[in-house]
Image: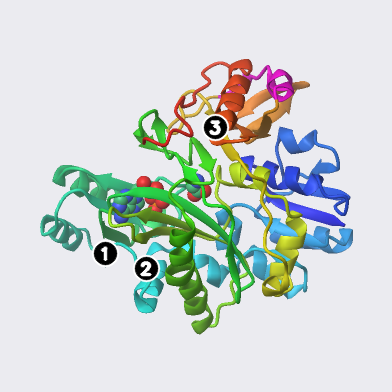
């Protein structure tokens, strides 16, 4: 069967890598893909613009693609899945209406409040002065969020009143374009974070193994927020009792609340959760897609064929398939970013050492890479995700970091504490 993957980051390389292991999958078509997917067996990159929905749909039809997976949030929010549905094409991903769960934080918040899903208390503003007055009446820290998509940069966890007020000013003065026309001000939640990637057909929802993402640029969880500097799985926080609570108080009520609104959610629902000091999980955010880099630690431990799982969602029979099967042990992914990331990432730096890194047992997922004049060069903020699995997390960490030590390019930036359970 032919599979089409839309997107070109580390998450999409990991999806392609997992599909490639199945004998049933004969062709993996990536739009646009990256240098990693360009050189993988069975895999081919295609140079459509991700926004060319009409072109991509026609291509999928002509090629007889049996399953399309949409990686990033932007095409989902712009309605690519609706295009595919209009042509009756099998696609894993939520419709534009369903993707609002990520593309509008206020929409998601309202859904959660109505359904009684545990989340931080909040208020929404379209007027900066009212927002500032509200902040002055609240305790600090406080969290200021742009309503719309802002590539992970639309959230400020303000630790002083001045910082909160300045974040409000920045959002309303158009730093995030229309994404900042509405601003959500949210209670600061203490605790530890866990990412739950759950697959759903709109009726049944099944979590994949829980992961932890390390969002800050610097070791010890310092520095600016990024798209994610690494991850590990399974998260030590998520014991069976907590997973059962997440299933019954968050995942199932969310799918039910969507259904009440006439939305059949097919795809990955990513719940970013805070496990508060009392042990209660609360939703920080929902995403309408697989996480990046969480996917790069979850898929290496997945035993079940990915296409079986995702097609069961597309064909609305997830409740009928066998439990998802996992390898034992631990998994880690160390993200190697460009110098200047996240503000002004450098590009075009010559990358070496990937082969050597892989010889030591690591899986090197490409993200911002491309081939230029027959050489591999960096091409974006997050360049590579160096993943490894081991009999336990410690072994996985040791394999991954040994691999990282073989890879070099000018300005390479990575955290040395990915997988640490103390931060
Ligand atoms: P988001 O883009 O909503 O995932 O937010 C980015 C990061 O900001 C999260 O991963 C958290 O670390 C932090 N954050 C967001 N909302 C809150 C909150 N209400 N309380 C504490 N931290 C938060
Ligand atoms: N790792 C965070 C995200 O995918 O949004």
Left or right relative to 90: residue 143: left
Give me the residue at 46% from left, 75% from top: 253
Q: Where is residue 395 in the image (x, y as percent from the top left)?
A: 58, 29
Q: Mark 1 points at which residue?
A: 122
Left or right relative to 67: residue 120: left
Q: Is residue 127 above or below residue 361?
A: below
Q: Name the residue under label 2.
A: 109
Q: Mark 3 points at which residue?
A: 335
Give me the residue at 34% from left, 61% from top: 280
Q: Give the range drawn in magenta.
A: 347-360
Q: Earlier in the sequence, mark 2 or mark 1?
A: 2
Q: How far apart are marks 3 and 1 (CA)?
A: 32 Å
Give me the residue at 73% from left, 69% from top: 321
Q: In this view, does 145 lie above or below 416?
A: below
**Which picture quadrant has residue 241?**
bottom left
Q: How far apart are marks 3 and 2 (CA)?
A: 30 Å
Q: In this view, does 404 lie above or below 333?
A: above
């Amino acid at each position: 069967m032919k599979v089409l993957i839309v997107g070109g980051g580390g998450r999409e390389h990991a999806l392609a890598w997992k599909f490639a292991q199945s004998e049933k999958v004969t062709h993996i078509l990536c739009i646009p893909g990256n240098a990693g997917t360009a050189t993988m067996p069975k895999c081919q990159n295609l140079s459509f613009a991700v926004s060319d929905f009409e072109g991509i749909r026609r291509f999928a039809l002509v090629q007889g693609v049996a399953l399309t997976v949409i990686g990033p949030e932007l095409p989902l929010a712009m309605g690519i899945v609706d295009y595919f549905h209009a042509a009756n094409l099998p696609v894993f991903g939520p419709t534009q209406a369903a993707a609002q769960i990520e593309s509008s934080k206020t929409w998601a918040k309202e859904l959660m409040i109505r359904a009684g899903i545990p989340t931080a208390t909040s208020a929404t503003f379209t007027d900066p002065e009212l927002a500032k007055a509200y902040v002055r009446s609240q305790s600090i820290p406080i969290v200021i969020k742009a309503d719309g998509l802002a590539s992970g940069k639309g959230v400020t966890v303000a630790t002083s009143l001045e910082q909160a007020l300045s974040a409000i000013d920045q959002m309303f003065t158009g730093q995030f374009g229309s994404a900042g026309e509405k601003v959500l001000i949210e209670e600061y939640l203490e605790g530890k974070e866990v990412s739950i990637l759950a697959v759903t057909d709109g009726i049944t929802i099944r979590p994949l193994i829980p992961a932890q993402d390390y969002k800050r640029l610097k070791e010890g969880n310092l520095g600016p927020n990024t798209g994610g500097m690494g991850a590990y799985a399974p998260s030590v926080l998520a014991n069976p009792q907590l997973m059962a609570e997440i299933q019954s108080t968050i995942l199932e009520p969310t799918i039910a609340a969507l259904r009440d609104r006439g939305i059949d959610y097919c795809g990955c629902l990513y719940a970013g959760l805070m496990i508060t000091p009392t042990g209660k999980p609360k939703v920080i955010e929902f995403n309408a897609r697989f996480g990046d880099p969480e996917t790069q630690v979850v898929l290496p431990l997945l035993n079940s064929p990915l296409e079986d799982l995702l097609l069961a969602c597309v064909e609305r029979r997830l409740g009928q398939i066998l439990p998802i099967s996992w390898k034992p042990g631990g998994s880690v992914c160390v993200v190697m970013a460009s110098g200047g990331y996240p503000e002004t990432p450098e590009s075009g730096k010559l990358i070496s050492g990937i082969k050597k890194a892989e010889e030591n047992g690591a899986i090197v997922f490409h993200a911002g890479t491309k081939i230029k004049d027959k050489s591999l060069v960096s091409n974006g903020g997050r360049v590579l995700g160096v993943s490894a699995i081991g009999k336990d997390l410690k072994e996985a960490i040791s394999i991954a970091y040994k691999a990282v030590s073989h890879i070099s390019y000018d300005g390479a930036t990575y955290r040395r504490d990915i997988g640490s359970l103390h931060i």
